[in-house]
Image: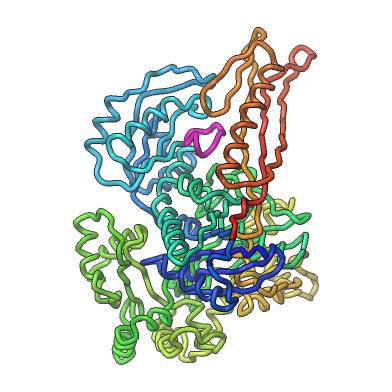
Amino acid sequence: MAIMLGVDTGGTYTDAVLIKNETEVIASAKALTTHFDLEIGVGNAVSAVLNQSGIAPTDIVMTSLSTTLATNALVEGKGGKICLVFIGFSEKDIARQGLDKALNGDPVIFLKGEHDHTGSEVVALDKNSLRTALYKLGVVSGFAVAGKFATRNPAHENIVRNTIREITNTPVSCSHELSSKLGGPKRAMTAVLNARLIGMIDNLISATEVYFQSIGITANMMVVRGDGALISASQAREKPIETILSGPAASIVGARWLTEETDALISDIGGTTTDVAILRNGRPMIDPNGAMVGGFRTMVEAVAIRTFGLGGDSQVHLARDGLSGNLHLGPRRVMPISLLALEHHKIVHDALDSALGAERVQDFAGQFLVPLVGCVVELSERDQVIFDRIKHGPIPMAQVVKSRIDLGSIDRLLARGTIMHSAITPSDASHVLGYTDAWDELAAKKALLLFGRMRTGGGEILSKDLNELAEKIITQLTEQTVESLLETAFSEEKIEGLAKDLARHSLTKTGLSHHRNIVSLDAGINLPIIGLGASANTYYNAVGHRLSAKMILPTHGGVANAIGAVVGQIIMREMGKIESAGDGAWRTFIGDGPKSFNSQESAYNALREALTHKVTLAAKKAGADNIRLRFEEDTQEAMIEGRKVFVEGTIVAVASGRPRISQA
């Protein structure tokens, strides 16, 4: 009997599942994700499934981890302060591909140095300027390195990486190690995001491994990649960017395993995000342009998932720009008031009672700021002043904000993960309506009463009826979920117009209500929808009804991500290129510099051999057994004077296999 353990760490919950012989779920559990110490949340979830099943830790032969922490960080604009070393580029290149937004004010070191498209050095690397800049640089959590045509010759990136490690002993992300494609600014973007995530993912993996070892689990740990495949924990540490969309990708694999549906929309609601994907012919669609998360386009191969800042713990906002009291959810996740009260009962209830007893509702009434234990980052003098007001909290936000200038510091502290915000969420509304009773229902009711006293743009009180306001919040969650599903569906249709605009167009919304007058209008989703996530059973029946679609809510759908973490495959890909160098010469590129050959056949044979070695080694390093190899080849030709001329060839080597099983 082979017992496998899957764990998924999300923004709100950590899930665990035990699967026997890859065919049967024998136990599943949820525990709150403890951001201040991830090991606690992992331990609570794993110990629960072990107690349910009676399985001994030593009987577990495989463990696997998926996570939405990297995805959530990019959606919410969080992550450590990093430095980009940009080789051969200028300041105007920072504005390309949204790189300036990804950097968000973090330092950049511009260096002279350049290779051309053939991999030849055309400008020598300025090593002295690098050393000078590094000695002057303040504290950063990691470095991103991107050089011009580094995928054709990574020599400059390698020298810079080694120099940074020698001087700073800080993690370095080189762009050529993350993507073999051309496009320097886009590779730089991927390297920047990778560098920003290294500390976070390393912390999660370390916490999980420490806990496993402490209870006697000795099996090797796998981590889910953004395309749903598995990699080793050490590989995930080196390239944490590959774990963006890890949780959603695992959910797709789990949804397929749970339902056996071959064509469907999959919608996975978490605390922070809603992730939507399309299943076609039993396979998730892969985004050919690279994963898009939080408005950033990366070069990471991942399932084609649209991630929306919408979840059970999304902050509820009152729109002040109109006369009516319109609500909007997200994109930032906050800690629900009902959850904060569970952990800090007196502080929360005293503050809510005081606010309810006041004659007028102050700005930020019913909101709290919470320091995160153990998070140490370098703060500006201004931000340090604000943090000092919060560090012994939780503390009501109204007591922290002395002027509007303070809000900028709070935003920066939230982005760096130094503090957390607590406010009204759909989870609080669910407690008010009796849909759940997991946390402090009374705190949720007090917070919604306070929120209902806020004034709309027309000067009217938002709501005097507690249940009416809670229903309004849940209805808004339904509406934004419907828009997310429609946007995903429209993105695959050949209909003129932007998918985002079409999903929110008045004609579409009229069609959802099956309008019948002079004009007859219908709109909906023509595929089954598989609803996943802890709160899918609470919210998604209304979504299916609104879209006139079959809604499937599978048993164990709340832990589909943890299931997908166990049942996936190890899949490694390595890409190489061949170019004609003219006059019977051929040149190959595989990430370690150009190599020349005097025939096309010898170039192809050498490239296949090099790729086979590289991809097989990567698969073995990931822990794959019974490795299978296949090649995907593409040739580009041009017509010159009536004859076909070879321009470029691409070979992708793919190695796959199930993870090696430990002996129990």
- Quarter holding the C terminus is bottom right
Q: What segment carries the magenta color?
A: 175-185
Vertical placement of residue 186 versus 458, above or below: above
The answer to whether residue 483 of the structure is visible from this angle is no
Q: In which quarter of the image is residue 351?
A: bottom left
Total labels: the figure holds 0
Question: Horizontal and vertical percent for residue 396?
Answer: 29, 78
| Residue at x-position 57% and y-position 54% | 224
Question: Horizontal and vertical percent for residue 84?
Answer: 37, 39
Relative to 139, 6 lies left or right: right
Vertical placement of residue 602 versus 438, above or below: above
| Residue at x-position 54% and y-position 19% | 118
Q: Quadrant of residue 357?
A: bottom left
Relative to 449, 133 lies left or right: left
Of 176 and 311, which appears nearest the observer?
176
Relative to 642, 5 lies left or right: left
